[in-house]
Amino acid sequence: MENLEIILLDFRKEEIETLIHEELKLSTLNIKSSHFYDFNSGKDMEFPRVKNMKEILSPKGTGNIVLEQLQLGITLKNVVIVFSFDEECGDIVFNFPESEIFIGDKKEVKSRFEKLVNYLVKLKMKYNIPKVIIGYEPADDEDTMLIELSDNALNLEKVLEKILD
């Protein structure tokens, strides 16, 4: 079984608190494990102890959270979120088993994938994310990328046909 990835590219650090607490509601979810490094204190830290994500990821920073499940238009189980930021922007990667999407008949798969993509399109617009990529790990590789949401128009039906055939 392979893993799928969703990458939010060049996400603005100033929006990270809103995304984490209001959009993803991470503080209310069942976290299996997490790891962040606080450059200010020089200590490792778990997500529940992080008071401010922007600060923990500054000036540069990385961290990860392993979740039992996460809502991204659909419920995804066993999700790993990796944060990797420089001074201004960074990438947020959601990694999860492909069976969370690609299981069942074509109609079910299509429905789940459409809901996920529609949610990501709304997220992209709301947070002004330049590019969102969905694909097999590593999703940003041309050979494993399934879909790229940029400022160009997207024909979701054509993409789904290509993926499901």
Image (cartoon, rainbow, N blue to C red):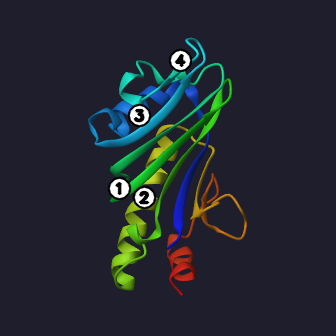
Disc nearer the start of the sequence (3/2): 3
Disc nearer the start of the sequence (1/2): 1
Where does label 3 land, which residue? Answer: 20
Mark on residue 55?
4
Q: CA distance from mark 2 to mark 4?
A: 31 Å
Assess whether mark 4 and mark 1 are in contact (beta carbons under 8 angstroms): no
Q: CA distance from mark 3 to mark 2?
A: 19 Å
Is the residue marked by circle 2 packed among few (<14), some (14-19), or many (20+) residues within 10 Å?
A: some
Disc nearer the start of the sequence (4/3): 3
Residue at x-position 41% and y-position 67%: 114
Where does label 2 land, which residue? Answer: 118
Task: Identify the amino acid type marked 3.
Answer: Ile
Relative to 60, 122 lies left or right: left
Disc nearer the start of the sequence (2/4): 4
Q: CA distance from mark 1 to mark 2?
A: 7 Å
Residue 113 horizontal/vertical position (percent): 42, 68
Q: Secondary structure at mark 1?
A: loop
Mark on residue 32?
none
